[in-house]
């Protein structure tokens, strides 16, 4: 999915995972995000966003560090996570909003 065409106003839950190429924690976080995407396929839209190449989207969601995540439900930001979290923590956030 091209982030330029990402509809974050759509109904449902969207997880934006902000990362960059040189961030070690971002590499650690990728398998966590992939597992969540696989486990919640059909219930959750997951999009990785490179803060270097998609700075406009990072600015829109006031993301200043990577890794960061923004959880959006029905077009509204419901959680901002400005650091790495593990699978269980991320799953808790997602289950709360499902």
Image (cartoon, grey):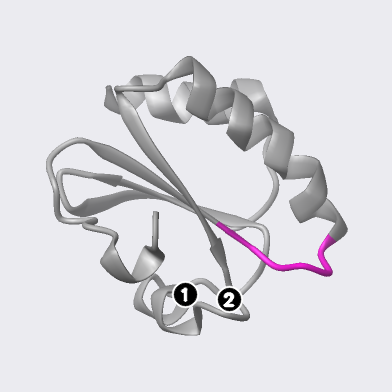
Residue neighbourhood size for the residue with mark 1, other residues' Cα within 10 Å, grouped as few (<14), some (14–19), many (≥20): many
First reached walking from the N terminus: tag 2 or tag 1: 1
Look at the numbered disc 2 and give the secondary structure of its residue.
loop
Q: Is residue 21 magenta?
A: yes
Look at the numbered disc 1 and give the secondary structure of its residue.
helix
* Residue 8: image tag: none
Q: Are marks 2 and 1 in contact (CB under 8 Å)?
A: yes
* Residue 57, placed above or below residue 36: below
Q: Is residue 12 left or right of residue 93?
A: left
Principal SS element in the magenta part?
Answer: loop
- Residue at image position (12%, 40%) is 11
Q: Position of residue 74 (x, y in %)?
A: 15, 44
* Residue at numbered disc 2: 64
Quarter of the image holding residue 87?
top right
Q: Is residue 29 magenta?
A: no
* Residue at numbered disc 1: 58
- Residue at image position (42%, 20%) is 40
- Residue at image position (58%, 76%) is 64
Residue 81 in view: no
Q: Position of residue 72 (x, y in %)?
A: 30, 48
- Residue at image position (33%, 71%) is 4
Which residues make up the magenta segment?
Answer: 18-23
Q: Could you tell me which quadrant the N terminus lies in?
A: bottom left
Residue 61 in view: yes
Q: Nearer the viewer, mark 2 or mark 1?
A: 1
């Amino acid at each position: 999915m091209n982030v330029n065409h990402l509809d974050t106003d759509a109904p449902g839950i969207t997880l934006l995972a902000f990362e960059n190429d040189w961030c070690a924690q971002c590499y650690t976080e990728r398998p966590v995000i992939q597992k969540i995407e696989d486990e919640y396929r059909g219930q959750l839209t997951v999009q990785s966003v490179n803060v270097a190449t998609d700075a406009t989207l990072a600015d829109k969601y006031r993301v200043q560090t990577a890794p960061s995540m923004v959880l959006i439900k029905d077009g509204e930001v419901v959680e901002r996570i400005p650091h790495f979290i593990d699978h269980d923590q991320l799953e808790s956030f997602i289950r709360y909003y499902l």
